[in-house]
Image (cartoon, rainbow, N blue to C red):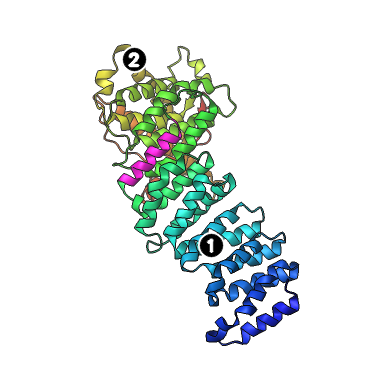
Amino acid sequence: MASMGELYRNYWILADAKEEDLPKHKRSYAAILDGISGGFKERMLAARLIPKFFKYFPELSAVAFTAHLDLCDDKYISVRHQAVRGLLQFATNENLPNVADVLIQLLKTDDVAELDLANNALLHILKVDAEGTLKKMIHYIRKGKKIVRKRAIKFLSLKLKSLPEEVMSKEAEQLILFNYKRMLKVVGGEDFYLFIRILSSLHIMQNDKGRQLLVDLMFMEVDLHETKNADSLDSIYRFIKCTQQVMPFFSTNVHSNTFVTHFCEKILPILGSLNNLEDDNDVHLEVLKLLAEMSRFCGVNDKIEYCMLTVFDTLLNYLPLPPEDAKDNEDIKLHFSHIECLLFVLQQLGKKLPDFLTMRVHGEKLADFQIRLQYFAENLQEFIQPLRLALEENSEEVMKPGERKIKREVLKIMSNIETLREDLSSFPPSYKSSVTLSWTPETEAEIGQKRKLEMTASMSPPKKQKTDLMK
């Protein structure tokens, strides 16, 4: 067992030697390796010196690496920190996979500083040898301990997107793609969404085929074919989260058919049963917003008619009937935000099945729809006109901060409803109008136009109706 004096004496021998003469001092380096058998100070010094001279003694490389690994697992946290810092000096040629293996195993640590050191070193190794490091990480994701798997997935989800193509080669990315099914077998919960982030960050996934794969994977995760507990609030929240994650992947070439169909088959029919929940309006509206956004990317499929019938029936439930007595107007609640969503969905799906309202909905049901829609339009005008005047008569200096913005947002809902109503009320429906959903960001042109027209909605509506202006 080497003492501190012996360690320093052998260190100075190595430090004073010329680089070409260092291999001649094998005994001095071997003495430094013995430092791992000493106390705290000796092991701390050995953790600094072993990697410093490692490359000059290839015949002792296996012994030196094993000795340093012991220090990475030392009982003293300071020794472990120093040893982890030195690991990168062993990361050359055939040692790269071994160093990567050690760093991945270190992800299990409970020490925050040690975890940061391991993550930073692992990123360095990944940049040097992406393919070799990924092979190791895939192995631990598939077969490693849960904590290592979770942290390896988190590491890749955060780091891969920042790596340039020259680092993440096509071969390295294909390695992940080739193994994704095996990894998904052990990945669930929050880790699944991080794994989707990993896949979506790959350069080879930035095309329609790649995005379609991501949509299909999300479809599987939400377990759309399973009916057990489909009517639970937890299931609906799960669907909402999954849909929010998949939304960026939809396009004119990557369709939302499966999600829209599931929504119409499993979610819309049971929304009414959630009325006893304190936050039911939030759930209702969040679900309808997602359906509206998805409907833009729904392609022609054999479920379109079914989906439109479901949306149509849901819309009827939100559209009030004219009361027999005018006094009953006070008890009517107008769900502006919800109706905007449903009218938009009906219009978007109607583009795929344009004869729906003229050929597929008949008799009393169609008449009931027209009556309700017309009555709603009349009420809508009673809100819009006073609100326009409110904006015209009050400058931005007079209004409270943010009030004008809120008024414009509410008017956007009402303007959208009026445009969509006119579209669907024509005979046959035109399906040609274009609206921007009220909660989506406005373009500069739209903002300028709204300021010019002062098309806003009031936060002080007539008292004869209850309103729902939730967004």
Residue highlighted by disc 2: 365
Magenta segment:
209-223
Q: Nearer the viewer, mark 1 or mark 2?
A: 1
Image coordinates for residue 69, horizontal then vertical, percent: 61, 62
Q: Is residue 407 above or below residue 14?
A: above
Question: Could you say which is closer to the camera, residue 224 or residue 388?
Answer: 224
Q: Confirm whether the magenta stretch covers residue 219.
A: yes
Q: Earlier in the sequence, mark 1 or mark 2?
A: 1
Q: Is residue 254 left or right of residue 392?
A: left
Q: Which mark is residue 305?
A: none
Q: Is residue 300 left or right of residue 321?
A: left
Image coordinates for residue 41, horizontal then vertical, percent: 74, 70
Q: Which residue is found at the position 47% from the left and 65% from the top?
A: 94
Q: Which residue is found at the position 36% from the left and 56% from the top?
A: 171
Amino acid type shown at disc 1:
Val
Q: Is residue 65 left or right of residue 173?
A: right
Question: Could you say which is closer to the camera, residue 230 or residue 134?
Answer: 134
Using the rendered image of the protein, determine whether residue 374 is visible from the camera's viewpoint.
no
For label 1, the SS is helix
Question: Could you say which is closer to the camera, residue 460 or residue 393?
Answer: 460
Gap between marks 1 and 2 measured at Cα? 71 Å
Image coordinates for residue 346, horizontal then vertical, percent: 34, 28
Label 1 Cα crowd, 10 Å radius (few <14 / some 14-19 / many 20+): many
Q: Which mark is residue 99?
A: 1
Q: Which residue is found at the position 34% from the left and 39% from the top?
A: 435
Label 2 Cα crowd, 10 Å radius (few <14 / some 14-19 / many 20+): few
Amino acid type shown at disc 2:
Lys
Image coordinates for residue 29, horizontal then vertical, percent: 62, 77
Using the rendered image of the protein, determine whether residue 15 is visible from the camera's viewpoint.
yes
**Which image quarter holds the N terminus?**
bottom right
Q: Which residue is found at the position 59% from the left and 47% from the top?
A: 147
For label 2, the SS is helix
